[in-house]
Image: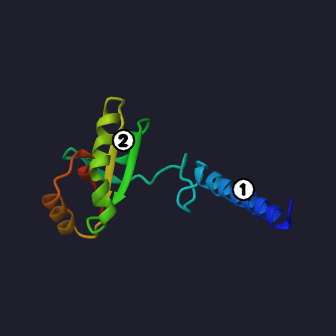
């Protein structure tokens, strides 16, 4: 075996080890795009509007609640709305709910967005000022 063959094998194994390490880090449940995990932490209790009635987040204690923070000016927020509506339909029968929390600073942007983009229950459930 020549030195070049040995170096190629070592390089190949090093690349595979690096790829495995990167995969392991990103596959860990505690990894959230660089954010610390919020699993098991208590959420801030805030006022929500669900189906036209006022409620507090704490009213959903014991249920599965998916909070999605979005904004009318965010392109990826607009793209994910149909998927959130599908998720809402899947978890509704199990007592779950998807709450779309708008972070728009003014009500007019929020209202204009909902007129331009008819969304289902998941996106229009909540407006937080």
Examine the image and state in which quarter residue 89 appears: top left
Image height check: is 91 above or below 114? above
Instruction: Answer yes or no: is residue 19 visible.
Output: yes
Residue sitting at the far top: 93
Residue 96, how many percent across, how many down?
Answer: 36, 36
Q: Where is residue 50 drawn, in percent x and y?
A: 25, 46
Identify the element where label 2 is drawn: helix
| Count of marks placed on residues | 2
Q: Residue at x 33, y 45 (%)?
A: 98
Earlier residue among tags 2 and 1: 1
Residue 59 badge: 2
The answer, for residue 55, to whether it is visible in the render is no
- The residue lying at 38 percent from left, 50 percent from top is 67
- Residue 41 is left or right of residue 119, and the answer is right
Q: Label 1 belongs to which residue?
A: 17
Label 1 crowd bin: few (<14), some (14–19), many (20+), radius 10 Å: few
Front residue of this view, candidates 2 and 115: 2
Q: Nearer the viewer, residue 83 or 45?
A: 83
């Amino acid at each position: 075996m020549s030195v070049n063959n040995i170096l190629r094998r070592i390089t190949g194994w090093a690349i595979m080890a690096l790829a495995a390490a990167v995969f392991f880090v990103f596959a860990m449940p505690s990894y959230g795009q660089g954010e610390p995990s919020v699993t098991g932490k208590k959420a801030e209790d805030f006022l929500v509007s669900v189906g036209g009635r006022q409620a507090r987040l704490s009213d959903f204690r014991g249920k599965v609640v998916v909070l999605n923070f979005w904004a009318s000016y965010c392109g990826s927020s607009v793209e994910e709305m149909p998927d959130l509506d599908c998720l809402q339909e899947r978890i509704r029968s199990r007592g779950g709910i998807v709450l779309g929390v708008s972070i728009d600073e003014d009500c007019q942007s929020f209202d204009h967005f909902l007129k331009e983009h008819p969304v289902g229950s998941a996106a229009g459930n909540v407006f937080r000022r």
